[in-house]
Image (tube, rainbow, N blue to C red):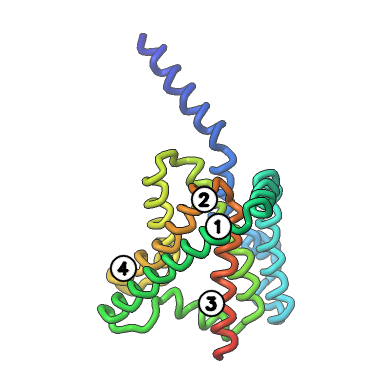
Amino acid sequence: MQDSIIDKIEGKIKDWFKKNSKFLIVILLYLLYQSNFIISLISSLGINVYSIPRTPRIFLFAFTDLIYIVILILMFKKEIVKGLKDLKENFLNRAILSLNCWVVGCVIMTVSSIIIGLILGQNVSQNESLVRESIEVAPLYMLFTCSIIAPIFEEMVFRRSLYGLVKVKWLFIVLSGVLFGLLHVLGSYNSILDFLYIIPYGAMGSCFAYLLIKTKNITLPIIVHMLHNTILVLVQIIGR
């Protein structure tokens, strides 16, 4: 009897991993990306990446970023193509929905950021400060990373894969926002109060999650995310 129960549990666990292996691979790829796995691999071959002149080094980083994106696109090729067809057939509807979600996300993001800034006595989050510093150093690379790499990777992880793992819609929207916000705080916080910035970042993440739920089209939040980041980076580049 006990062996039968154990076998059933093992069977369910195996079925779950088999069913969700694609999403788990995406999360693994993201962890490798965040840890600069390919760059570390190159360094392990005895190549000092950081001694390479600045311009070719930037191209190397951009190339390694593209490797991950190509893998993701190949993994979700059918969904992306289907999403583009859906966007073409329902363009006006999708555009209005996207604009509404984006405006709501921007309003919550802006208002909460101002309030948090007043509480902490700073103008922007530490993450935003680091991004602005990076834009000063390598504007074109940051435009490429923020406008293409980050939107595709983050939407595949925090929206598509998470939605595949979490079937309850309201829970998915909440988790998607919280985890997305946490991503933008964890690597740059100075104090526990900096975690308040999960709210503005998470608000936009939840809006992207809502878009996915309403349309079942991962391509749409990717495009909106791309446009959002592109606007923000261009404003910083132009205003330097």
Marks 3 and 2, Cα distance to the nearest angstrom? Answer: 22 Å
For the residues labelled 1 and 3, the Cα–Cα distance comes to 16 Å
The three-letter code of the residue at mark 3 reads Leu
Residue indicated by mark 1? 221
* Quadrant containing the C terminus in the rendered view: bottom right
Question: What residue did someone put label 4 on?
Answer: 196
Is there a contact, CB below 8 Å, between mark 2 and mark 1?
yes
Q: Residues within 10 Å of mark 1 (few under 14, many from 20)?
A: many
Residue 104, label in figure: none
Residue depicted at x 37% and y 71%:
189
- 3 relative to 90, above or below: above
Of the image marks 4 and 2, the number of the one nearer the N terminus = 4
Q: Amino acid at mark 2?
A: Leu
Tag in front: 4 or 3: 3
Mark 2, residues whose alpha carbon is within 10 Å: few (<14), some, or many (≥20)?
Answer: many
The first of marks 2 and 1 along the sequence is 2
